[in-house]
Every structure is written in C-alpha cells, then in structure tokens.
Image (cartoon, rainbow, N blue to C red):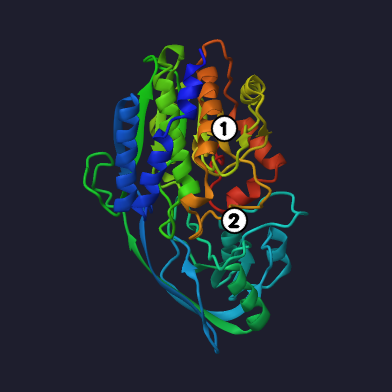
Amino acid sequence: MTRWIGDVFTSDVGWTHLERLVDIGDRMAGSDGEREAAELTRDALADAGARNARLETFDVQGWTRGESAIETAEESLRCIALPRSPSDRVEAELVDLGYGLPEDFDDADVDGAIVVVRSDVPSYADRYVHRREKYYHAVEHGAAGFVYQNHVEGCLPPTGSVGTEEDPIGEIPAVGVSSEVGARLARRYEGESIAVSVEAERHDVDESRSSVSQTESDPTRSQNVHAELGPDTEERVLVTSHVDAHDIAEGALDNGAGTAMLVEIATALAARENDLDTRVEFVAYGAEEVGLVGSSYHAETTDREAIRAIVNNDGVVGDRTLSFTTHGFEALERAATDIADRYDHPIETVPELGPHSDHWPFVRWGVPGYHVSSTSDEVGRGWGHTHADTLDKLESRTLREQAILLTDLVVELADSETAIEHRDPEAIVEDLEEQDLAEGMRITGDWPYDEL
C-alpha cells in the first residue's frame, strides 16, 4: 500500500523533466521554445504511462521583444519591455507613485506623465494589487508611460504582461526596472522630463486559420498538452500547470517546477491507476503568462460541469510547505487538511479567491479548484519574472515530498465517495466583491459577469 511513496521519493522523473525545460531557454508564449517544451511534456506524460498524450493548438497574440530604453538629460538607464507593451516612445514628466495602490492614483495627477510604481504592496494594504491593475489605473488616469519597479534587490528588472483579452496589446508603453534603477529615477528625476521607448514586434492572429489544424511552429500559435489516466468516466479531475515562461529567464519556479510536478504525479498515478474512481486529465497549458490564454481556451471548449476538481500547480517547489488557495470550496479545504493529517506534514490553506493562474477560467464559473503553490514570507513573486528564476534556487527533495502529498490528494479527489459541490457563479461574484477583488478585475478587463 505504501511502496509507491518510496518510488516517488527516489524518482528522478520530475526533476529530469525540469532540467530539460530550463535548458530550452526561451519558452515565451508562441515561441519555438514553448512548443518544444510542450512536446517534451507530451512525451514525458506518455512515457509515464498516461494515454492519449497530445497537443491541442490555439491562436495567441504574438509579441517579440526588441530594444527598450529610459533616457534622461544626463544618462540612459537599463530597463526591459513588459510583454505586449506597444512599440512607442513617449517623453513626459516622471511621477513616482510608490506602491501604486488605487488610492495613490486617485490622490495624484498623472495625466500625461510617466508613472513609476513598485511591484509590491505595503503591509497596511487590504489586498495584493497585481501589476496589470496598476498598469490600467495608470491608463485610466491618463498616464503616457508606465515604469514597473521591482521591490526585490539585486539589479533585477521584472517582466510580466500587460494587455487585456479584448485588446491584447497595451495602450501605453510599459517597461520594468530594477529596484536600484527605480530608486535612482525617483531620487534624481522626480518631476523632470524623461523618455521611455519600447521597440517590439507584434504578430497578429490570422482569423482564417483553424485553431487546431496547424502542426508547425508559428509565432501566433500556442498549444495545450493533454493526457489521461484512470477509468474513462465522463467526470474528471484536472491536474494542471503551465509550460510557458518569460523569455528573459529559465522559468524554473514559474513554472517549470509545476510542469515537472505534473509529470511526477502522472508517473506515480500510473502505478496506482486502480485506485482511481474518476478519470484524471493532465493539462500543461500554453500562454499563461500573457493572459491565461491556454486555460481560457480550454475552459471555453470543454464541459465545465464534468470537471470534479482542479489541482493547478503554479509556484510549487519554491518552499517545502505547500499552500492551497481553496476559493471557498469547503470540500477542497477538508481534502487538503486530511492529506496533511495523514502524513503529519504541514500545509497552508487559504480559503479566499485567487483570480490569477490557470485554475481561474474554471473557478470563476464555480468549478472547484485549487491554486497550489508554496508558502512564502515575501510579497509578490520573489525571483519570479526576473533573470534570477533559475534551477539552482530549487531542491529535488522538495519536488519529491510535495509530489507524494499531491498524488494522494488527487486520488482522494477522484474517490467516488468524496463529495465536491460546484458553486454558483453568483456566489463567486459575491466573494469577489467582499474580498475587494472586483474593482481590479473590472479595470483590467477581466470581469466576465456583466450579464449575470
């Protein structure tokens, strides 16, 4: 009954897959590297014993980074473009808004200015304010340009996309700068004129093509990886990750580790397939980093009512203790706690909503889902979305330990005696309002509930 635990704890399957992913280099959405990573993951799932391992392609707004610059009267400062920034050059007064909370924009005049904001939030903030929300507050208040300052020291300019589902390319040029460059800008050039320029190439979707027919790599195509284990039931449990990463780093934590976990869980469950009462579908999504495109495509083209639960791995392995955002689903909270008790292993559960990552296109309509990550004392992503998201920050021991817990959790969720109820979308809306998340979703164009 427990031999499988020893097999997982001595397995090198997941870690080997992680090494292969980070060695690809650029896994940006729509790139050759992203497709190579998807193909490697498809093959790894097949080798693990999962059936019907395949790729499903879809259209995505392509974007390729060019040169970017911040220029003052005295010097040029290092920066990188935020993905899906428009290609443009603006010259305007610099306004430093610190944390860039919604009230900071309300209290300042940034019309026609270039605004710089930090990537974190203060301890007194009621909630985390996402990069895209800060960007669109800047747009709404008439800013001409956007500078996103990392709060993590180490000369690490952060990346992260802008744009909306309706308008994938942002409205004003946007760049990321390191903590040190941001501090220099604020100290020397607050209230003075500076210039921000972005060069980028966009690759628009060809509406005449089928979303599933093309097999060759193309800058406006991405793909999801699918594979299955267990009985061929209509109902299913999804175990997910995303295979893409930003083009400036290896993407080890975000989210090579999640995809490695997917492969490790599949390997373990293949040996325990008789323990599954419900079909388990493994999905490694493409184009997560540019607006949850792959998971949104899947959510729109599948039967959401047949999904029993989602275990979305995005941010695992960063710390030894798993963190489960449970989105108000009490059955998911109980299942995670039961696993922790069974193994006498600490976990963290967060009952609030988390409207970021690939569970959200499903959870927002009431599908039970976890966002599985790691505990952290830091605000924000730490090394994530920077050049420093590298393999040396992670440990294979952590991957194996967490894979044991998550494998048994999936078996628990697939058990026909485990009762898991969907939630009404109206209840999700109510929670979003109560948790002060609705405003941010509306301003970023992510609010899908206008017709409810």
Residue 396's place in the image compared with 86, above or below, is: above
Q: Residue at x 51, y 68 (%)?
A: 175
Three-letter code, disc 1 = Tyr
Measured as percent of width and height from the top left, residue 385 is found at 51, 56
Measured as percent of width and height from the top left, residue 390 is found at 48, 53
* Chain-order first, disc 2 or disc 1: 2
Mark linked to residue 22: none
Residue 230's place in the image compared with 251, above or below, is: above
Measured as percent of width and height from the top left, residue 236 is found at 44, 21
Identify the image quadrant of the C terminus: top right
- Dot 2: what SS? helix
Query: Given the current orientation, which residue lies at the most extreme right position?
Result: 124
| Residues packed near mark 1 inside 10 Å, few (<14), some (14 to 19) or many (20 plus) | many
- Dot 1: what SS? strand
* Viewer-side label of 2, 1: 1
Residue with the mark numbered 2: 133
Three-letter code, disc 2 = Glu
Could you tell me how far apart the alpha carbons at marks 2 and 1 are, in whole angstroms? 23 Å
- The reply to whether callout 2 and callout 1 are in contact (CB within 8 Å) is no
Residue with the mark numbered 1: 370
Q: Residue at x 40, y 18 (%)?
A: 271
In front: 112, or 221? Answer: 221
Q: Residue at x 39, y 44 (%)?
A: 286
Instruction: Indicate left or right for 219 with 351 as reference.
Output: left
